Amino acid sequence: MMKLDKFHDPRKNRELLSAITGKHLNIAKVITETQQLFQQCMKNEPVPQFNKAPITVPFSKKIIEGLFRLFAKPYSILEPTQIYVDSKGNVYPEWKQNLDDEYENLLRRITREVNIEDYGGIGDGITDNTAAFQRAIGKGLVKVKVPEGIFITKGIHLPSWTYLVGAGKGKTTIKLHVTASRGTRLITNANHWKGNHHIVIEGMSLDWNVERLSVAKKTSTWGNHSSCLTYANVTYGWVKDVEAINPGLHCFDISSTLYNYAGDGFRAQGGSQYVWLDNLNGYGFGDDGITTHHSDYIFISNSHMCDPSGRAHQKGFSNSNGFEIDDGSRNVLLVNNSSARCFGGIEIKGHQNSSAASNVQIVGHISVNDNRSYNFRHIGHHKSTDTESKSAYNITAVNLAAIRPIFTDLYKYSTPRGLVVSAYKNVVINHFTLIGDPDYDYKSNPVIAIQYRARNVVLNNLSFKGFKSASTDIKIYGGVNRADSVFINNVSVHDSAPKIIDIGKDVKEIQVKK
């Protein structure tokens, strides 16, 4: 039985996907097909949403949103990123050449290459190395090597033009000091307000040392604090071959200066852009494994997140996702990642008082025992009494696997799903393998739910197996909050739910083709 624990090597995900699905896809051809489906989707004028008079917003909430707008800017949807495939089958975004050029620029600008031990660093798991890191890093233009060992610190702040490299995951460990406050970021860039650029972190484990908070029920404070690694307002950043252990909030947060809740149609100032995360592992996170906020042009590849603690939330209400593309994020590409035993494997979303993520593309993902393998939603814009989302647009996903979604103590009232789409428009899923446990009790819940005013949703080349106790493999919810303009093609079912597709009341536009 597949587990994908914290020792899983995510660089094997591409081959593992082929073994799981039994498909050896020509990924370049599939991406082209998906882009064509997406263009057709964009041209379709969906059935309008049914809107009642919106619920009156309390005056206090308007005041809070007004304050956030002092640090916000208008939200707009960018042109979707083009995806390319090289001769070896590697998938990358059109802007990666720009990032590669800036990496070479960083290497040229480095004037010092030093070892932390030459500045008093001692990797004995006891000595406080905070001052040693400060001396070694200086004002940047430096490559700092950290050898094998456990290096204790109260936090590291990286200026622009800095390359921090260890001897590898599990060999070099940077660990928070026992006296570090609950809001401490283990590693972050030096200036969140003015921003930083050209920063690399490579080849190490980052241990947030949650054990120091033995009596604390909640492990995080506020905003983008309490994480293993936070890039806030960073342009040109790389994180490669890094493991994150038991952070209070997130393993890796690619973020803006501050989170922003100025309302749908606005986003934070000071977002990050042009950042590549590759071959990352994370576990024990209080909220999410890898997350993005108000940031553009982010590439996440060959990474694995599993087994969150959920301790950033009230017990039993932990929305702890392996990968979360959150408020105001735009043009994010995820390639050949995996998640296990999270609330959501990949969640693409926005909060009610923020813009949703848009132009998110997934090429290859394995979800094992997540409660909701893939969850796309704009909270607070789901019902006929809610305002229609201005920002929840444009998701494409190819070559997905959802394996045995389950109930979870992380979120005790959440029912398992392979896919949920709520409020988003222009969503294309192509080549999706869903494998259930025929002996598990899914309590007559659907496997896929298209719901809450979702529009222009395309499901192409889906395969279901083993969801015998589910009610239906695909449910299109009807009623006043119904989904609509849904297009389903080529669904294969083997020993699964008693009903393949259940279409709710009043759905106007639905096409089903074999």
Image: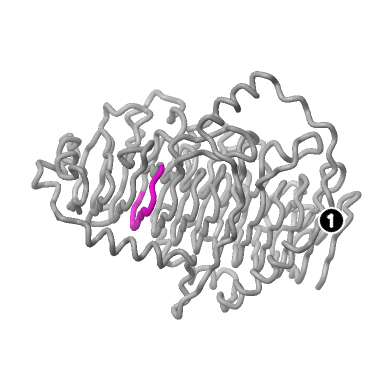
Asked if the stretch drawn in magenta spans residue 246, the answer is no
Q: Secondary structure at mark 1?
A: strand
Q: Kindly identify which residue carries mark 1.
A: 502
Residue 417 spot, x, y in % from top left: 67, 50
Task: Name which residue lies at 48% across and 32% down.
Answer: 312
Q: Nearer the viewer, residue 320 or 411?
A: 320
Answer above or below: position of 148 versus 62: below
Residue 233 spot, x, y in % from top left: 41, 43
Q: Quadrant of residue 224?
A: top left
* Disc 1 residue crowd, few under 14, some 14–19, many 20+, Cα 10 Å: some
Task: Name which residue lies at 34% across and 45% down.
Answer: 196
Q: Main secondary structure of the magenta part?
A: strand
Is residue 509 toward the left or the right of residue 80 in the image?
right
Is residue 115 toward the left or the right of residue 421 in the image?
left
Q: Residue furthest right?
A: 506
- Is residue 373 visible in the rendered image? The answer is no
Residue 128 spot, x, y in % from top left: 17, 34
Answer above or below: position of 450 versus 212: below
The magenta stretch is 233-243
Is residue 233 toward the left or the right of residue 109 in the image?
right
Q: Nearer the viewer, residue 86 or 431?
A: 86
Residue 150 spot, x, y in % from top left: 21, 44
Q: Quadrant of residue 138?
A: top left
Is residue 502 toward the left or the right of residue 108 in the image?
right
Q: Residue furthest top?
A: 60
- Amino acid type shown at disc 1: Asp
